[in-house]
């Protein structure tokens, strides 16, 4: 047997525990989260010829350094660590050193339950960094847009109705120029038309129609000081939103280029009819990864994506429960795919409609459809082939009677 180790990570200091093959503690140390500390940590593991290191995170700087040094890493989910603590204690005590010891013991005795960490290649990790960063920026954009809407509804509701999206470039430009009702008091159709032309408005609505939307909304009755205060808040929120919207657009372009250049990009692009769905296709690829051995069966992919329920059985009782522990980004991307596909794919719509007919609500029906899609994705992903509706047996059998 090999010497194993566990590392309890923290923002400033990491705790290392190394155990011998018979379970005795061989070493226990603290290392700072600095270049000197991480270098010393890696060097100590190599000195002790540690065969495996268990850690709670599957990624991050420390994990990258361990893998770069040729040290095998075992990723242990925090729920699994929490469930294992009582195996090694009689009371309810907990410490960083104890958690590191439990991790080391799991790497020593329970490797039949875990897999060694197999990182994706560089292009996949780059794509994942882009998609997750974009998702974070989108969340911030939505939060700021909601704050902006709340401010406008309080004293100028018409500004929220003139354009379809409050965080669109044209709407932000309008609010930057007309942040309060007083600023737009002399705004007429001719002046609005000039503003729209200068800002590249698409022209789907006439200036008179847009102006009518603005005028027909309820009128706020905020006093002078409150109006000035809210006007300042609107300008501040617009100033925060404009660069955010621009950076999201830039990241989307970079994601499209990275997906196009990826060796598996054609597989996931083929799942969508709309070319604008590039972000969701990229998210699917980035979260599933490129290591086929990580998912030897489709069931493991269905579980990690949160589409397969958790079975709870006891005696005659058998219940399927919602799966909380999963890759949330992957679950979201699969849900988008399922919802989009049911509108144009007869097979997807049939699965969705039959699920609704059984009494399932919309989110549950989407998970049922998402699980079916993951079986298709797993197959074409392992075969390195793009999705071809003409080769989709279930779809063709459904369409055959119509033909």
Image (spheres, rainbow, N blue to C red):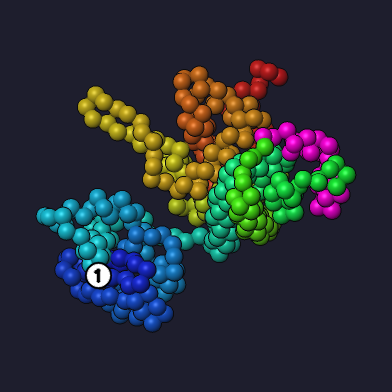
Residue 386 rendering spot, x and y as whole percentages: 64, 44
Is residue 389 rendered to the left or right of residue 192? left
Q: Residues within 10 Å of mark 1 (few under 14, many from 20)?
A: many
Q: In this view of the protein, can residue 308 be seen by the observer?
A: yes
Residues in magenta, as a range: 192-218
Report the quarter where the N terminus lies. Answer: bottom left
Residue 15 rendering spot, x and y as whole percentages: 28, 70
The relative height of residue 361 versus residue 49 in the rendered view (above or below) is: above
The relative height of residue 45 versus residue 52 in the rendered view (above or below) is: below
Q: Which residue is mark 1?
A: 17
Q: In this view of the protein, can residue 108 be seen by the observer?
A: no
Q: Nearer the viewer, residue 209 or 403?
A: 209
Q: Quadrant of residue 62?
A: bottom left
Residue at 65% from the left image edge and 23% from the top image edge? 399
Q: Is residue 202 magenta?
A: yes
Residue at 51% from the left image edge and 52% from the top image edge? 287
Report the quarter where the C terminus lies. Answer: top right
Q: Nearer the viewer, residue 196 or 177?
A: 177
| Residue most extreme to the front | 224
Residue 28 rendering spot, x and y as whole percentages: 22, 74
Q: Main secondary structure of the magenta part?
A: helix
């Amino acid at each position: 047997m090999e010497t194993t180790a566990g590392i309890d990570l923290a923002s400033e200091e990491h705790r290392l525990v190394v155990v011998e093959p018979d379970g005795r503690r061989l070493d226990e140390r603290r290392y700072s989260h600095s270049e000197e500390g991480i270098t010393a940590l890696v060097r100590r593991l190599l000195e002790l010829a540690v065969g495996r290191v268990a850690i709670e995170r599957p990624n991050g700087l420390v994990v990258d350094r361990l893998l770069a040094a040729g040290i095998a890493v075992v990723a242990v989910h925090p729920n699994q660590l929490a469930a294992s603590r009582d195996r090694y204690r009689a009371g309810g005590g907990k410490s960083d050193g104890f958690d590191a010891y439990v991790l080391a013991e799991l790497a020593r005795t329970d490797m039949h339950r875990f897999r060694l960490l197999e990182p994706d290649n560089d292009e996949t990790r780059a794509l994942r960094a882009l998609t997750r960063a974009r998702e974070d920026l989108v969340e911030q954009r939505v939060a700021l847009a909601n704050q902006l809407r709340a401010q406008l509804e309080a004293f100028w509701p018409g500004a929220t109705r003139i354009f379809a999206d409050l965080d669109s470039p044209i709407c932000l430009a309008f609010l930057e120029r007309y942040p309060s009702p007083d600023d737009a008091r002399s705004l007429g159709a001719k002046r609005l038309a000039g503003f729209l032309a200068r800002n590249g408005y698409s022209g789907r609505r006439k200036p008179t129609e847009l102006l009518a939307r603005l005028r027909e909304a309820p009128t706020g009755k905020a006093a002078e000081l409150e109006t000035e205060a809210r006007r300042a808040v609107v300008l501040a929120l617009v100033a925060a939103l404009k660069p955010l919207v621009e950076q999201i657009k830039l990241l989307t372009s970079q994601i499209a280029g990275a997906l196009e250049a990826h060796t598996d990009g054609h597989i996931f692009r083929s799942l969508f009819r709309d070319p604008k769905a590039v972000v969701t296709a990229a998210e699917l690829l980035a979260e599933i990864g490129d290591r086929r051995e990580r998912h030897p069966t489709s069931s493991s992919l269905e579980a990690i994506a949160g589409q397969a329920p958790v079975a709870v059985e006891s005696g005659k009782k058998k219940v399927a429960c919602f799966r909380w522990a999963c890759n949330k980004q992957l679950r979201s991307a699969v849900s988008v795919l399922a919802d989009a596909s049911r509108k144009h794919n007869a097979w997807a719509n049939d699965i969705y409609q039959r699920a609704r007919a059984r009494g399932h609500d919309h989110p549950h029906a989407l998970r049922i459809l998402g699980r079916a899609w993951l079986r298709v994705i797993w197959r074409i992903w392992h075969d390195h082939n793009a999705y071809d509706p003409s080769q989709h047996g279930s779809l063709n059998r459904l369409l055959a009677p119509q033909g």
